Amino acid sequence: MTLIRQLGLKAYIDFPGAIHTRFSHALGVMELAGRLADLLIARLATEGKPKAASNLHDNRNNIMAAGFLHDIGHGPFSHAVDFPLNKLTSKTHEEISTRIISEELKELEHHGISIESVNRIVSAQHWFPFVSSIVNGPLDVDKLDYLLRDSHHVGLKYALDIENFIEGYTVLGDDKDLSKSELGLENTPEAITSAEIFLTIWKGMYDLVYHVENSRIAEKMLERAILAGCADDNDLRGTFENPEKATQLYDEKLLEILQQIKGFPQDTAAAILSKRGLFVKTYDKELSVEQFPVISQGFLEAIRPTGASEASFTLSKRTCETLKTEQNHIICDLVKSRVPHSIHVDEIDSQGDPIELKSKSSIIGAIKEKIRLKAYIHPSLQKKIDEATLSKTIEGLVASW
Amino acid sequence: MARDADLSLLISTIYFSKGEIKGRKRLQKTVCILKYAHNIPFDFNFRPYFYGPYSEQLADAMNVLEAVGLVVEVEDPLPSGIIQYDYFLTKKGDKVAEDIVSKRVHDKNLLSTLKTAVAKISSLETSDLVVMAKSVIQ
């Protein structure tokens, strides 16, 4: 983790000052997980929820360990390698994390840490949902750490007072049945306003940093370069088909390997390192029925939450075939803006259900998902394929999916 | 319908609810009951939180339908000061729903079951819907 930059390729392309690593983020998440657990233990004890308080107390070290280890299954360049890793191993980075924790960190059991609890927290499957939610949920400390850490390192001076914000956290639900409990917010103007600030920063960071264009193009090129490299090079394929080996790679090592594989992998590594020869954005349209002549139901089903990367990959392949270009010389990319998942406040409605934060705040309700379909082309295609041809091809494929 | 037909089923559900579902809670409970009590093959996973079953995947699917302009989410401020969010099919969404209902010959039985079930569920008060949703996932 000390050799993987937290912001992945963004640290190479757009934000060279962002040299912080996965390791520093992991430490931050562990620290915040401990602080939040302590705060909730004290609060629950005074709020007449002794069972929840006692459970959190017993799980405090597990929660902190999960905070430290939650990203241990990431490959080099953080999320940029998620898609090829998932495609070649059929495992998510969370599944890889839990396997590493189970098989390589058994020693933790001798230090009072339950491997099963840690894994359940990392994968949001803890018996008691509020416990998992501290590390993996809509209000998790993972987001709190990465937002402020990343914004600091890219030079954005956001002001979110974490200490003040987590003061507004609470556990919702009946103390008698913790299996249905949930991490939520106090029903106070301060907690709701702090959540609005937090979620606005979160959305802003996706627009300004995490989806910034040149880095995004480099990430998509890297995905394709790894897959092309795995098709041509047995060693690289062997590495990526084995999660244990893949997670031993680090940023510079992966680039070094790609530099040795002639063709697209080598060219991509050179483009990333020199920032020259990156693909050029040639198509960019909001994916909506107002903008697209026809969007087939099949395409819509394909782009649902877990399918956007695979749908982009297939669309890229079909576009290259239709326009008879070299494979990987046109990359289609579905970019989905982020909307917050459901967060509840400690207020009950007339049916006895807690109320969603969104129902208390128009600001949260105004954060809507947008999907853009973009295409990036190899610089050599700029004079051969015009925007109109590319547009017609892509829109035809979306309509007939 | 194939297993990857969640969005088609969701559009059809709103269509059979006369083009609108009032409230996110009503939407969640309706789909949960359709899945577990009427065997409509939604692929969404529901978790039994203390406030009743909830599916993040369903919420995500609604976000996609709204993003592409087939569904619109409208704020409906209630007298209590709480904002309720109601879902309506847009004109394009309505057209897509009509296409699904009229052209999916092989799915006629499923769509007929869905239509009947949605009619039953639509007549329930939200409080009854909440109780029923909790009971089907226990």
Image (spheres, coloured by chain):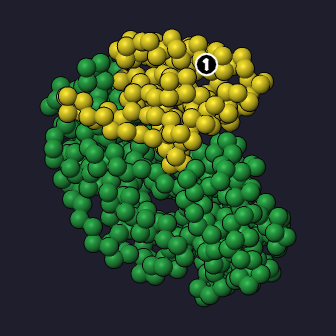
Residue A138 sits above or below residue A397 on the image: above
Report which colour depicts chain A.
green
Give above or below for A56 relative to A12: above
Q: Residues within 10 Å of mark 1 (few under 14, many from 20)?
A: many
Residue that numbered label 1 is attached to? B114
Mark 1: which amino acid? Leu
In the picture, which chain is yellow?
B
Is residue A353 visible in this depiction of the protein?
yes
Whether residue A362 sits left or right of residue A397 in the image: it is left
Residue A160 position, x and y percent, is 24, 60
* Residue appearing at x 81%, y 69% in the figure: A323
A264 sits left or right of B41 in the view = right
**Residue A38 percent location from the top left of the image:** 24, 44
State which quadrant residue A162 falls in: bottom left
The quarter of the displayed image where residue A19 is located: bottom left
Name the residue located 58 percent from the left edge and 85 percent from the top edge.
Answer: A275
